[in-house]
Amino acid sequence: MTLRNKLNLDNAVELARAEERISKQRAIQLWQSDELKNFRAGTFETLAYIHKRLFEEIYYFAGQLRDENISKGHFRFASALYLAQAVLSVEKMPQESFEQIVAKYVEMNVAHPFREGNGRSMRLWLDDILRREIGRVVDWSRVDKNDYLQAMERSPINDSEIKALLAAALTDKINDREIFMKGLDASYFYENYYAYRSEELK
């Protein structure tokens, strides 16, 4: 099953490859233009803008809140019915310290505001907050993928594990494009590690 897309692709592998190629190109443009400086760090507006910039050539819903319920494994993300309220609550969370920023990131992941492309968008959003609030970013090449997945699965109950994992990978290389792009690569892997499915409200 493939999502309806502007590229008219109906093969999941081809669509995934196109997503990776195009989103990387758009991320480089986002980096070079420094567009995010025009937005306030940690807001949903900023996250939606990142998502739109990465995926507007691919999906009609780029930058828009999803109107379907989605789940991963046995975990169901925030109900589409209450999604707008959920992201507003996350936006209001404090972000003055590393611990507060990661807690906010975890809650936005639980909300999962978009139909597709959450991982890539949220990772850039997280690093934007970290860079502007504490002068650090995550070097995702130093984060073990399996450890990350397990920590994120447990994070809605206890976020101490994901905080420790990301804290160990912090770097002050906030102006390094390679570090920026590693985040995009990592989030692409994480996002496609599991299949997502749409579910009807019962």
Image (cartoon, grey):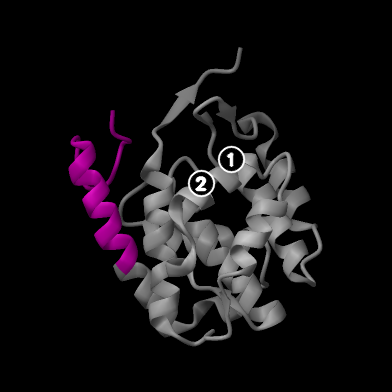
Q: Quadrant of residue 192?
A: top left
Left or right placement of residue 86 versus residue 51 in this view: right
Q: Residues within 10 Å of mark 2 (few under 14, many from 20)?
A: some
Q: Is residue 82 above or below residue 96?
A: above
Q: 11 and 163: which one is in front?
A: 163
Q: Amino acid at mark 2?
A: Leu
Q: Residues within 10 Å of mark 1 (few under 14, many from 20)?
A: some
Point out the image quarter for the N terminus: top left
Q: Is residue 22 magenta?
A: yes
Q: Quadrant of residue 105?
A: bottom right
Q: Residue furthest top?
A: 202
Left or right placement of residue 10 versus residue 155 in this view: left
Report x, y in % for residue 40: 67, 72
Q: Can residue 8 be seen?
A: no
Which span of residues is magenta-colored?
A: 1-24
Q: How many marks?
A: 2
Report x, y in % for residue 167: 64, 68
Q: Is residue 11 magenta?
A: yes
Cβ–Cβ under 8 Å for marks 1 and 2: yes
Q: Which residue is mark 2?
A: 149
CA separation in Å, label 1 and label 2 = 6 Å
Left or right placement of residue 117 versus residue 69 in this view: left
Q: Secondary structure at mark 1?
A: helix
Q: Is residue 114 above or below residue 132?
A: above
Q: Which residue is mark 1?
A: 153
Q: Amino acid at mark 1?
A: Glu
Q: Residue at x 52, y 52 (%)?
A: 148
Q: Secondary structure at mark 2?
A: helix
Point out the image quarter for the C terminus: top right
Q: Can residue 48 be seen?
A: yes
Q: Residue at x 49, y 58 (%)?
A: 121
